[in-house]
Amino acid sequence: MFCEHGYLRNKCKLCNPEPTRVIPKSPFIDGNLAFKCNWLDTDYEGPCGKAGRRWNIYIKQFPWCIQPENPCYQYEMGLRKEIPPYPCYETEIFSKSEYGAGVNHRGPRKNIGRRIRYVVPGKIALFTTVDPGKGGDTRYIFGFFVIKDDYVDGYGATKIIGYPEYTLKIPRDSRLRFWEFYRNSDGSMAWGTGLFRYLSDESVVRYLERQREVLIKNGHIKEAKVVEEVMKKFYGD
């Protein structure tokens, strides 16, 4: 009945050690980010053109795009003659290596910025979108940068800053589907609410490896070298 350690045999932790529990590593700890971005007909080389404004303002009516203070909206309403270079976060990704968490445009927190709780320098920020008329399951990654720092803007929103040398727009013929590397907890492929998602290092490494392969296959050697350098310097490959 009693074991050599002086306890009931079925109660002794030495005779009956608990199996080691494997606790999944949280992607929050890794600190990689993926952002949901609006589609720009300029391919993120400047503010929306006519097609982009039609899609984002009139058809989708995205919150920032239809705000009275939005320069693109003002242009459409005939209230200004020109659109400035950076009317939205999307226009800052590749020219400034920056992106933001956004500002609330309705409700009790209107005009109050949103925060990103975990921002980890040296981790990657992926930028994703869906083409007009396509389903959410076709969401693709059109670029990324490695996070260098972050700050809080005048609205109280988190802004992340990337390394310019590790900022890359993926050529159109080499863009990969986001859901190949990330799934919701229920296995679905729908983004739903929220501007960003956290990704594990494992997911990011799988993406970078595959992205490098596709870039090389399509003859984009310069871009493939950037991906390779990111893998070696920040993910230990």
Image (cartoon, rainbow, N blue to C red):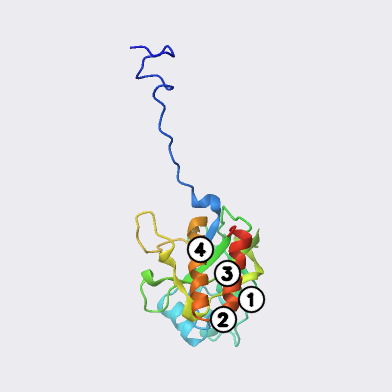
Q: Position of residue 126 (x, y in %)?
A: 53, 66
- Quarter of the image for residue 60 reads bottom left
Q: Is residue 43 left or right of residue 122?
A: left
Q: Earlier in the sequence, mark 2 or mark 4?
A: 4
Q: Position of residue 91 (x, y in %)?
A: 58, 76
Q: Position of residue 141 (x, y in %)?
A: 48, 71
Is label 1 in a helix, a strand or a loop? loop
Q: Residue at x 61, y 74 (%)?
A: 94
Task: Specify few, some or many for label 2: CA neighbours under 10 Å numbering under 14, 14-19, or 20 or more.
Answer: many
Q: Earlier in the sequence, mark 3 or mark 4?
A: 4
Q: Quadrant of the N terminus?
A: top left
Residue that numbered label 2 is attached to:
47
Q: Is residue 128 left or right of residue 151?
A: left
CA gap, disc 3 and disc 1: 18 Å
Residue that numbered label 4 is attached to:
34
Q: Which mark is residue 227?
A: 3
Residue that numbered label 1 is attached to:
95
Task: Specify few, some or many for label 1: CA neighbours under 10 Å numbering under 14, 14-19, or 20 or more.
Answer: some
**Residue type, numbered disc 1:** Ser
Q: Position of residue 213 (x, y in %)?
A: 50, 72
